[in-house]
Image (cartoon, rainbow, N blue to C red):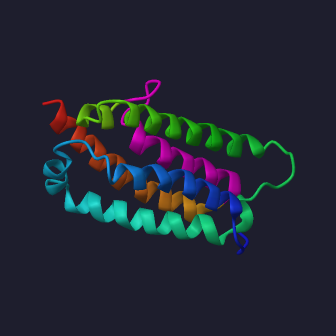
């Protein structure tokens, strides 16, 4: 692991944050009701994971493009899934923006808005050979995906 700025990490964070900033003004009706019921342990995992992932993808240069070896497959896979995440958001913003739209799947990936970015982080960690980011991705996944699955169950009751 090598300390240094990661422009790849910054690009991924921008791709992650921009739709979420837009979403803050276009939340599904009734979202606040579901947010009140979030499991506090899952919320703690989610917040800790968000902070760790944000910091780690920026401070390790290992995530920057390095050569043209077979490791690039991991980065390419992460990029493809990040593009799928953007497609999820485009579809959501073009929809009626209901809770069902927000917790929909994409190409069979359940709660795609939560699952895809977690998988991207894990792939980026594998690419950068960074166990700290991988652990942070697991922490994020437990909280973020857990909360979204909880909300999804409530929506489809």
- Residue 103 percent location from the top left of the image: 31, 36
Q: Residue at x 59, y 62 (%)?
A: 131
Image quadrant containing the C terminus: top left
- Residue 21 percent location from the top left of the image: 41, 56
- Residue 89 percent location from the top left of the image: 44, 39
On whether residue 54 falls in the magenta region, the answer is no
- Farthest bottom residue in view: 3
Front-lying residue, 18 or 118: 18
Q: Where is 20 relative to 105, above or below?
A: below
Front-lying residue, 65 or 132: 65
Taking the image as shown, residue 129 lies to the left or right of residue 48, namely right
The answer, for residue 127, to whether it is visible in the render is yes
Classify residue 12 by image quadrant: bottom right
**Most common SS among magenta residues:** helix
Q: Residue at x 30, y 48 (%)?
A: 146
Taking the image as shown, residue 90 lies to the left or right of residue 110, namely right
Q: Where is 55 relative to 46, above or below?
A: below
Q: Where is 115 relative to 135, above or below?
A: above
Q: Residue at x 38, y 35 (%)?
A: 92
- Residue 116 percent location from the top left of the image: 48, 41
The magenta segment: 105-129
Taking the image as shown, residue 8 lies to the left or right of residue 86, namely right
Front-lying residue, 66 or 104: 104
Number of numbered tags placed on the structure image = 0
Front-lying residue, 102 or 124: 102
Classify residue 110 by image quadrant: top left
Image quadrant containing the N terminus: bottom right
Classify residue 24 by image quadrant: bottom left
């Amino acid at each position: 692991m090598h300390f240094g700025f990661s422009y790849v990490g910054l690009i991924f964070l921008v791709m992650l944050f921009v739709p979420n900033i837009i979403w803050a003004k276009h939340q599904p009706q009734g979202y606040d009701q579901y947010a009140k019921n979030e499991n506090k342990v899952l919320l703690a995992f989610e917040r800790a994971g968000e902070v760790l992932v944000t910091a780690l993808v920026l401070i390790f240069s290992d995530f920057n493009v390095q050569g043209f070896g077979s490791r690039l497959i991991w980065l390419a896979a992460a990029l493809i899934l990040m593009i799928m995440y953007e497609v999820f958001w485009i579809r959501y913003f073009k929809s009626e923006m209901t809770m069902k739209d927000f917790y929909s799947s994409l190409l069979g990936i359940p709660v795609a808005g939560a699952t895809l970015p977690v998988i991207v982080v894990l792939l980026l960690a594998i690419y950068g050979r960074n166990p700290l980011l991988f652990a942070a991705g697991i922490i994020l996944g437990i909280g973020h995906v857990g909360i979204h699955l909880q909300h999804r169950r409530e929506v489809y009751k």
